[in-house]
Image: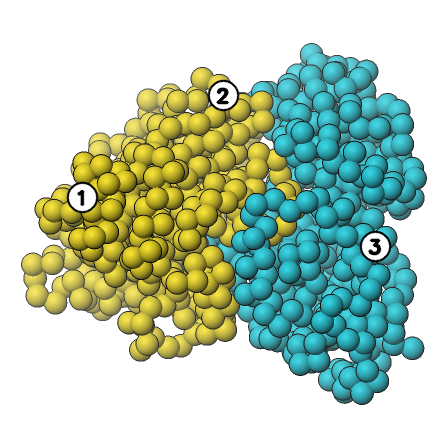
């Protein structure tokens, strides 16, 4: 590693190669619970430097792991088997904004929200809005195929990326897709988005821009029973109204959030739905009337944000919810699972039973509109055995999601958190096919190794369930 | 009679057209009588004829692919075969696997047609953007060819709607990607890989979709821009307007231009649309049935063009419109299908392609006639090497067609 370090320092300068133990420790974790210490961290500023790092690490046979802001929750940006972390957050130029074609080209280190704010005057924005959008990078969004509350109406990252410049494991630079649609050949752009840095490293990303809505309205439906909130989600989905966002917080979570953010959530309720409607002014008014009518059949009350300030406050509670949980528990584990939207009430009952069984509190803050759960398992790592119980409870929740026809991740990715759970939803044949796809891109398996597909440590995992 | 291509009502392409060659491909042999007999024993009686196998189940598809791999015979999903390749007629696989209207999800066999799906969904006031102009086209064909229609303007394509896929791979194994929930990032996105792959990586046998609610009240108007400059002004206006059109379609008979705008909403919402559109150009109401009209059959050559949307009218102005029989496309997206009156020569195709390429766009030919991949799709660009690696890795038995001449 010393030889590689020297080579990298010659290429990038010593100030952009991090090798001391203390510095590397900052890259030992992401937003999740896993830890892995890299041998080196490098900070390229250009595609050419990424190519140089790729070639040097390839020659040395050393794993390379791309990293954005490190806000991921599945260990995707951790150097699980050691090696070099390629921190891309110094590649943060907006290369082109082409409003007339609804496109922009950005480097991977551009921060999601900063980019949307920078083009807001044009009337357009980048639609994916993960909760971490103040900090997360668009390169990270591409790697994880990130979602967010508003993906209910607008789709996830892959629906908003039309082209990529990618450095492959052998150092070659390819361009996939374009500003134009329907590029002849295989859809490599769609294949690369969400591949968690295992197939190549994006150095430029062509984004599809979305027109800002003329109007938006935010409603807070307040429920005395969690089941009523869950059934209301199904009723809204079935009604033909597609909200821009449809979020749910259970009573335990909303009280914690309210204490931290003072968003105005009612402390005595069992659950709330945060519903956002966007579009043409008249459309939004019609949809709000329809949604209010649906909610009032089961909700205690429905509050409509009266102005932009109140709307922002309601969203502040949701967007900062995970951070607020630190006030009520020394540790918590954010899960990510997906279920059919008609099974929300059932799965919440299962989670309650799992909570009782393991003796740990579990809160629920999630994207109810697309069935994307984020149970929060609260524990105290200082208490012997609690962390292990939390992990077991989390796995039970994921198995419960799969049992009702769901998936093990809706937006956080597989990373090193869930690679061993992949056989729950994919057969060995499916996984072998995906492995062959990976080999076509990276024959040596050097890019972000032991991620996405089950690693060697997963041999004991059994019980594949075939989707579909 | 088992050999040689046959006319299948335009539903499938001939094997030779798919291969882009009149010759038996290198490394391929003529299918022997013994091999035909072997194949016949794998399927129910009567399901092998005219160079085509028509499996009735997933297991039979897998058996055909395994037979093909063992006998070095090419399998042409959705096409008829010839002396060295076996076509695969997927119309025997047309089950609805599940439909959960409350969850807005649907799973189907790949042999189900667009028309059947739309009928199932309409009963619950739901739909998928399968308005490709050919209700008899199967889901497998729509996915494999990544076909789309006017609703793409707002709703996207099957690429945006597919949440799970099932395929038979080169060794006859059955492979799944995605699942049946509307949001899912587990594993590699095999939906994206297979959609638009034109059968080159495997046989699509099943697909799961997220479906959308269909608006209760829709309306369509026609604008008649005087020329392409006026068409561009419409495109620019649509891009920047707060209105959210379902369709923004450019149509031409080679002489005049029309833009069809479709929108939805309550009476007052539609009134707002009408008012705003009136500030742009006079608009005539069109009956909603115009959207379900079947596209005219081909007479000359058919081209698919995609360009950055702002370059669309510049490209269309440069094309030899005199030979255009019809043009239909998504004005806001820069995606068009052009039908010529007469079949164009390879040289004429290259002339058109140069115009499109200058605008950083792409031109593909959908002629049924045989032609090399470079003529059909254009010269390879520099991600073709990676596509070649993907093709070789995933179709290691070289069972499936190679529409882009990758191998």
Of badges 2 and 1, the one in the foreground is 1
Q: How far apart are the two marked residues, 2 and 1, measured between alpha carbons?
A: 40 Å
Which numbered tag is attached to residue A123?
A: 2
Say which of B288 and A40 sits in front: A40
Quadrant in which the C terminus of chain A is drawn: bottom right
- Chain assignment, label 1: A
Instruction: Please tell me which residue is depicted at 17% across the width and 53% down the height of the picture.
Output: A2
Residue placed under numbered mark 3 in the picture: B370
- Chain assignment, label 2: A
Residue placed under numbered mark 1 in the picture: A18
Indicate left or right for B268 with A6 as reference.
right
Instruction: Please tell me which residue is depicted at 39% across the width and 63% down the height of the picture.
Output: A444
- Chain assignment, label 3: B
Question: The chain shown in cyan is which?
Answer: B
| Chain A colour in the picture | yellow
Q: Is residue B240 visible?
A: yes
Instruction: Please tell me which residue is depicted at 72% across the width and 65% down the height of the picture.
Output: B77
Residue B161 vertical position relative to residue A305 in the rendered view, above or below: below
Indicate left or right for A432 with B192 as reference.
left
Say which of B288 and B313 sits in front: B313
Of badges 2 and 3, the one in the foreground is 3
Q: Evaluate if marks 2 and 1 touch, with contact meaning CB atoms under 8 Å apart.
A: no
Residue A414 place in picture, x, y as percent: 36, 58
């Amino acid at each position: 590693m010393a030889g590689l370090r020297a080579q990298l320092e010659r290429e990038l300068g010593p100030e952009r190669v991090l090798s001391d133990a203390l510095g590397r420790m900052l890259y030992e974790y992401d937003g999740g619970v896993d830890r892995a210490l890299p041998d080196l961290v490098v900070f390229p500023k250009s595609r050419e430097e990424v190519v140089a790092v790729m070639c040097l690490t390839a020659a040395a046979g050393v794993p390379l792991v791309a990293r954005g802001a490190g806000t991921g929750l599945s260990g995707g940006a951790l150097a699980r088997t050691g090696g070099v972390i390629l921190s891309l957050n110094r590649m943060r130029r907006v290369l082109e904004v082409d409003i007339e074609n609804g496109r922009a080209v950005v480097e991977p280190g551009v921060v999601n929200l900063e980019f949307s704010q920078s083009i807001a005057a044009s009337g357009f924005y980048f639609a994916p809005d993960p909760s971490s959008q103040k900090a997360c990078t668009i390169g990270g969004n591409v790697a994880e195929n990130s979602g967010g509350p508003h993906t209910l109406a607008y789709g996830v990252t892959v629906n908003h990326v039309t082209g990529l410049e990618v450095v492959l494991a052998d150092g070659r630079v390819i361009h996939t897709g374009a500003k134009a649609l329907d590029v002849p050949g295989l859809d490599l752009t769609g294949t690369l988005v969400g591949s968690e840095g295992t197939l190549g490293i994006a150095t430029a990303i062509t984004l599809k821009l979305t027109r800002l809505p003329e109007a938006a309205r935010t409603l807070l439906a307040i429920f005395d029973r969690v089941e009523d909130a869950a059934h209301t989600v199904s009723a809204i989905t079935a009604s033909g109204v597609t909200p821009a966002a449809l979020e749910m917080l259970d009573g335990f979570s909303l009280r914690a959030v309210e204490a931290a953010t003072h968003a105005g959530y009612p402390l005595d309720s069992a659950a709330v739905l945060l519903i956002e409607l966007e579009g043409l002014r008249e459309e939004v008014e019609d949809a709000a009337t329809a949604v209010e009518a649906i909610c009032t059949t089961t909700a205690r009350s429905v509050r409509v944000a009266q102005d932009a300030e109140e709307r922002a406050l309601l969203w502040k509670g949701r967007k900062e919810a995970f951070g607020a949980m630190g006030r009520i528990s020394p540790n918590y584990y954010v899960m990510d699972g997906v279920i059919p939207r008609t099974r929300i009430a059932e799965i919440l009952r299962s989670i309650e039973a799992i909570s009782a069984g393991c003796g740990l509190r579990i809160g629920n803050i999630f994207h109810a509109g697309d069935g994307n759960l984020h149970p929060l398992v609260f524990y105290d790592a200082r208490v012997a055995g609690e962390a292990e119980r939390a992990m077991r409870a989390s796995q039970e929740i994921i198995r419960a999601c799969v049992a009702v026809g769901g998936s093990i991740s809706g937006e956080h990715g597989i990373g090193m958190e869930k690679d061993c759970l992949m056989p729950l939803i994919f057969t060995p044949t499916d996984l072998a096919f995906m492995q062959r796809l990976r080999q076509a891109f990276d024959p040596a398996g050097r890019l972000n190794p032991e991620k996405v597909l089950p690693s060697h440590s997963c041999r004991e995992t059994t019980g594949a369930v075939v989707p579909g | 009679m088992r050999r040689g291509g046959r006319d299948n009502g335009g539903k499938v392409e001939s094997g030779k057209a798919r291969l882009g060659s009149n010759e038996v491909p290198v490394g391929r042999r003529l299918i022997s009588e013994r091999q035909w007999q072997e194949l016949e024993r794998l399927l129910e009686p009567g399901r092998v004829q005219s160079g085509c196998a028509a499996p009735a189940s997933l297991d039979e598809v897998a058996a055909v692919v395994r037979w093909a791999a063992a006998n070095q015979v090419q399998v042409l999903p959705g096409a008829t075969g010839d002396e060295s390749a076996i076509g695969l007629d997927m119309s025997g696989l047309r089950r609805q696997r599940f439909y959960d209207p409350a969850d807005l999800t649907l799973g189907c066999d790949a042999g189900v047609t667009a028309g059947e799906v739309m009928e199932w969904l309409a009963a619950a006031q739901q739909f998928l953007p399968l308005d490709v102009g050919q209700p008899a086209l199967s889901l497998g064909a729509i996915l494999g060819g990544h076909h789309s229609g006017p609703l793409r303007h707002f709703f996207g394509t099957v690429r945006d709607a597919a949440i799970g896929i099932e395929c038979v791979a080169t060794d006859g194994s059955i492979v799944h990607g995605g699942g049946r929930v509307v949001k899912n990032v587990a594993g590699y996105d095999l939906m994206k890989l297979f959609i638009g792959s034109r059968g080159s990586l495997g046989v699509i046998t099943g697909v799961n979709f997220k479906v959308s609610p269909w608006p209760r009240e829709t309306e369509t108007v026609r604008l008649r821009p005087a020329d392409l400059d006026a068409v561009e002004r419409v495109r620019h206006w649509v891009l920047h307007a707060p209105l959210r059109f379902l369709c923004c379609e450019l149509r031409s008979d080679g002489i005049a231009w029309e833009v069809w705008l479709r929108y939805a909403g309550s009476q007052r919402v539609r009134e707002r649309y009408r008012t705003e559109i009136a500030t742009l150009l006079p608009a005539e109401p069109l009956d909603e049935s115009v959207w379900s009209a079947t596209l005219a059959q081909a007479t000359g050559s058919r081209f698919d063009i995609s360009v950055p949307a702002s370059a669309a009218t510049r490209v269309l102005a440069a094309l030899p419109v005199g030979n255009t029989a019809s043009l239909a496309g998504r004005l806001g997206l820069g995606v068009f299908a052009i039908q010529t009156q007469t079949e164009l020569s390879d040289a004429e195709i290259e002339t058109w392609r140069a115009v499109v390429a200058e605008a950083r766009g792409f031109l593909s030919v959908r002629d049924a006639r045989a032609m090399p991949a470079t003529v059909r799709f254009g010269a390879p660009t520099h991600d073709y090497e990676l596509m070649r690696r993907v093709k070789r890795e995933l179709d290691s038995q070289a069972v499936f067609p190679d529409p882009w001449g990758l191998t």
